[in-house]
Structures are given as C-alpha cells and as structure tokens.
Image: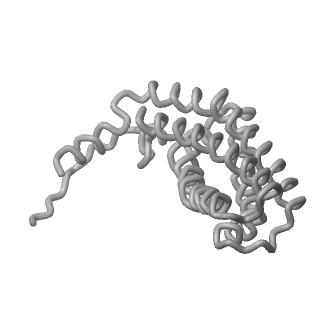
Amino acid sequence: MTVSTVEVSAVAVPPSLLSPQAPQPQDFEALDSCHREVMVTLNRLVQLIDHLAAQGPDATAQGMASEIVSFFNQTARAHHADEERLIFPDLLRSDDTVLVQHVQRLQQDHGWLEEDWLTLAPPLDAVAQGYSWYDLDMLRQATAVFTELYMDHIDLEESLIYPEAKRLMRQRPGAGSGRARAAARH
C-alpha cells in the first residue's frame, strides 16, 4: 500500500466543518429510536418493581431484570456517549448562551443518570440472578427519580437540542459526505 500526501491550500474553514463526527440524518433516527427504547424499558422497570412486590424474584422477574440491566449498562450508555460525541460539541460552540446552558445541563444529566443507575444496577442484577436481598422501597423510590430525570432529559433533547443540531447540520452542505464516500469505497 502506497501512502500519498495531499497538498491543501490555506482556506479558512469554520471549526464546525472540521468536526470529525458530524451527525448524519441516520444518527438522529438511531437516537430517536433509542429514546423510544428508553421509555419502554423505564415502563418495564416499573412493571418489574410491581412484579417483585407481588411475586418476588421469580423466573419472570429474573428475565425482566436481566433485560433492563443489559439495556441500561450497554445501550443507554452508548446512546449518551453518541450524544456527547455527535450532538453536543457543535452546540457547545454556539454563541447562544441559553442553548449552551441547556447542553451543559444535559451533560450534567448524563452524570446524574449514571449515578442513579449505579444505585439501581446492583439490586436489579441480584434479581436477575434470582437473589432477594433487594430493598423494594429503595427500588421504588430510585426508579421514580431515575424515570423522572430520564423523561425530562429526553423531552429537552427532542424539543430543543435535536432540532437545533439538525438545523446546524442542514447549514453545513456536504457535512459527512467525505466519510460516506470513504465508507462506500471500503
């Protein structure tokens, strides 16, 4: 394989065009889809708490807990990382201080959601393994806080942040097209 160099003329390029991870329309589709999955999984979490109150950590509870733990350990964390990488950087460079404050709030939410999850995960993982050492009242209270924060978080993203990110994306003609052409070659 031969490596060639390309000479680039000195052209002033706005920093937003240099973003190595400019969001694409399919990225927003995936992020929106994940929000729907979060809402379904939060409902499953509430159902699990009710099931534990009525039936204890039976096979149904174990399966539900296992799915919930897997979703929030993997999918939800990856979703937050994608937002931090694809959506937030350009918005944080905005001259709109209110928008920047909202993005910073969402970043803080990601930390709080992680903290809340770290409270919920061990007892839910125990349920997934068939143990009954969970505190049902703590699970109920922690689930309420976690659910409320997630719903507020998603509402802000979908009502303000994603539309603004999409607007910025439309203002950058060809953003990401080089990456798409490279992917098509490979």
Q: Is residue 171 left or right of residue 135?
A: left
- Residue at the extreme right: 137
Q: How many marks?
A: 0
Q: Where 48 sits versus 155, above or below? A: below
* Image quadrant assignment for residue 102: top right
Q: Residue at x 66, y 27 (%)?
A: 159
Q: Residue at x 19, y 52 (%)?
A: 6
Nearest the eye: 138 or 182: 138
Nearest the eye: 56 or 67: 56
Q: Residue at x 63, y 56 (%)?
A: 64
Q: Residue at x 41, y 49 (%)?
A: 20
Where residue 46 appears, x then y in whole percent?
75, 48
Q: Where 186 sits versus 176, above or below? A: below
Where residue 150 appears, x then y in whole percent?
72, 44
Where residue 27 appears, x then y in whole percent?
45, 39
Nearest the eye: 73 or 42: 42
Q: Is residue 115 left or right of residue 135?
A: left
Where residue 156 appears, x then y in whole percent?
70, 34
* Image quadrant assignment for residue 133: bottom right
Which color scheme does this rendered protein use? one colour
Quarter of the rendering occupied by the N terminus: bottom left
Nearest the eye: 141 or 66: 66
